[in-house]
Amino acid sequence: LGREEATGRGVVYVTIEALRHLNLDIRNSTVVIQGFGNVGAHTARIMQECGARVIAVSDVNGGIHSANGLDIPELLTRCKTHGQSLRDTKLGDWLSNDELLQLDCTVLVPAALSEQITGRNAGKLHCRVLAEGANGPTTLEADRILQDQGVFIIPDILANSGGVIVSYFEWVQDGQRFFWKAKDIQERLQDILINAFHRTLQFSLSKNTSMRMAALMSGIDKVAQAHLHRGLYP
């Protein structure tokens, strides 16, 4: 229960925390999402439910854009239930994936393929927050460019970890033979990701390093501490 939407829901939870850190409000934010598969579609739906204005989404062929905000429930009905492509829905202005990435927005969520943001296009991005829903969507060269531009990056290792967390929840429930309600799963996921976000943020600030490096450092530190207290083979 809750596994299908977990990655997208996790992206939203950490994005809200990043916006709060930057003194921004999700309800006054515009969101662009590259990808409208499992991660992108759920991210779009939950972002809109939280009050954000989702102004563009895309699939493999390109995207649609509406400055006033897209009708995400209608898009989901047409694309997921009736099998229409985004272009065929005609619910927004058509644009290429490259054009979509360069839209002016508060939050950009690459939720499709790896290496979509490179040294070639990083300088053309106009977002305040980059939340990596996909695995490895940003190259190291692009990461440095975006940091220099002041873009707040939520790295993939943190942003898209909701799926594996809820997979762990499934394992726990199977072991207990006791199953949780959707609300319980969402609350536990939110607690874990909020704590992980702020732990990463504190590492970033205290070590004067990027959020990407801080996420890796935080993870290694937790494993090291566990080995220290429990031994290598508990």
Image (cartoon, rainbow, N blue to C red):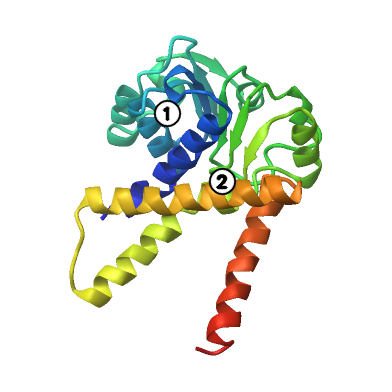
Q: Which mark is residue 171?
A: none
Residue 135 in sight here? no
Quick one: 192 or 86, which is closer to the camera?
192
Say left or right for 95 vs 118: left
Residue type, label 1: Ser
| Residue receiving disc 1 | 85
Label 1 vs 2, first from the N-terminus: 1
Vertical comparison of 50 with 223: above or below: above
Q: Residue at x 19, y 64 (%)?
A: 179
Q: Residue at x 58, y 28 (%)?
A: 22
Q: Residue at x 56, y 33 (%)?
A: 21
**Mark 1, residues whose alpha carbon is within 10 Å: few (<14), some, or many (≥20)?**
some
Determine whether the residue tagged by mark 1 lies in a helix, strand or loop.
loop
User: Residue 156, how many percent across, how many down?
Assistant: 59, 49
User: Residue 229, how many percent across, how many down?
Assistant: 55, 81
Mark 1 vs mark 2, foreground winner is: 2
Q: Residue at x 49, y 10 (%)?
A: 67
Say left or right for 33 vs 172: right
Marks 1 and 2 close (CB-CB < 8 Å): no
Vertical comparison of 12 with 149: above or below: below
Quick one: 30 or 215, which is closer to the camera?
215
Q: Which mark is residue 134?
A: 2
Q: Quadrant of residue 149?
A: top right
